[in-house]
Amino acid sequence: MKNEKIVTINGQKFDGVSGLPIGKPALNGPAIAHTIANASDIHSITQKSKTLYRSATQKPASHTAPMLRKVGRSMDIARNKNVAHFAPLKIAQPETQIASRLATKQQPDIGPSRHPLAAKVDNMRMVQQQKPVAAKPSKIIKEEAIAEAFNKLAEHQTIENKKTKHRSKQLNTFLLIVSVVLLVAIGYFIYLNIPILSVRVAGAQAGISATFPEYHPDGFSLNGPVSYSDGEVTISFKSNSNNSKFVIKQIRSSWDSSAVKNQVSKDSNGAVVNTTTERGLTLYTYDGNAAWVNGGILYSISGDAHLSVDQIRRIATSL
């Protein structure tokens, strides 16, 4: 079996594991002749000693070293698969893969991009720098300043007019509200005093100083307008819950208390007549009816309301 640990290259044997030469290479005829010829040439040429001139001359070059280096470089050494300390062979890559890698490396990364607004501002600045600004004449500058001042004045006047209109509108609204409130108050006052005004108007028409009672029993209200005739005023009250009513008459008269008592006694048809004195007034009452005289006016209360003596007394003192 052949020993695979020995490698032969150009007749020289080498150890396959350590790579060292084994023995001396066998020389063929031409190589031996060439070597002998070179050796004879070297030994046959007599040279002068250069020791004394070593500082001025160069050391003679050796002819054997280049030959050994040349022989070593030109040796074709086959690599054995059992040699483990050699570096692995690199497989050549296709040119397409190399080109793609180079293209990938040459592509730069995406750098930071400018904001659209910043780019727009830069473009506007470039346009403004490119456009030459022509100097305006002083006359045009003055006219523009005057026009701008007039425009500002007009705007100021417009604003003031708007404020004045707004204020006047607010004032008108306030006056309208106040007027409405006053009208309502006046109307309510008139509504409350209509009976008093009606009695005064009726008394003026009748020719007497008629008055409206400040008090009237609860549950009764004025029934219809105040009626009057020559020397007489009639005020009618009606109940809010039923048809009962009472009438107050004020008649111009020259009677005194005795005449009034006699007349009441006749009108009572035998009923008991009660005499009551209140604030200088002498009242004669019976079955919810009453009569008295004061200041030349005969007052009488009649009806089916069946008023009490106290209610009649309060009505009489409020007239």
Image (spheres, rainbow, N blue to C red):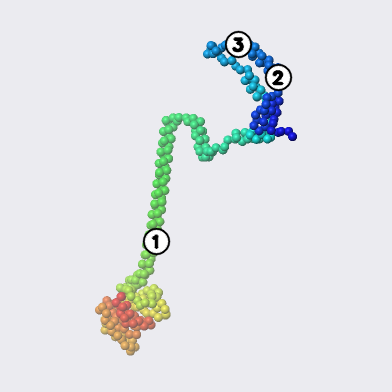
Choose mark 1 or mark 2, whichever is in front.
Answer: 2
Residue under label 1: 180
User: With respect to residue 138, does 54 lie above or below?
Assistant: above
Q: Residue at x 37, y 64 (%)?
A: 185
Answer with the quarter of the image where residue 43 lies. Answer: top right
- Do the residues bearing badges 1 and 2 touch, measured as CB atoms within 8 Å? no
Earlier sequence position, callout 3 versus callout 1: 3
Q: How far apart are marks 2 and 3 (CA)?
A: 27 Å
Q: Is disc 1 placed on a helix, strand or loop?
A: helix
Q: Quadrant of the N terminus?
A: top right
Can residue 90 be seen?
no
Residue type for callout 3? Gln
Instruction: Residue at the far right: name it.
Output: 1
User: Is 28 situated left or right of 239 in this image?
Assistant: right
User: Is 36 situated left or right of 242 in this image?
Assistant: right
User: With respect to residue 260, does 120 lie above or below?
Assistant: above
Q: Nearer the viewer, residue 128 or 149?
A: 128
Q: Distance between the residues labelled 1 and 2?
A: 145 Å
Q: Which of 247 and 66 is in front in this view?
A: 66
Instruction: Give residue 208's position: percent from left, percent from top.
Output: 31, 74
Residue under label 2: 31
User: Is 105 situated left or right of 262 in this image?
Assistant: right
Can residue 45 be seen?
yes
Q: Residue at x 68, y 24 (%)?
A: 24
Earlier sequence position, callout 2 versus callout 3: 2
Residue under label 3: 47
Residue type for callout 1? Val
User: With respect to residue 227, does 69 lie above or below?
Assistant: above
Residue type for callout 2? Ala
Dot 2 crowding, Cα within 10 Å, few <14, some 14–19, many 20+: few
Answer with the quarter of the image where residue 175 lies. Answer: bottom left
Q: Which residue is drawn at 59% across and 15% down?
A: 60
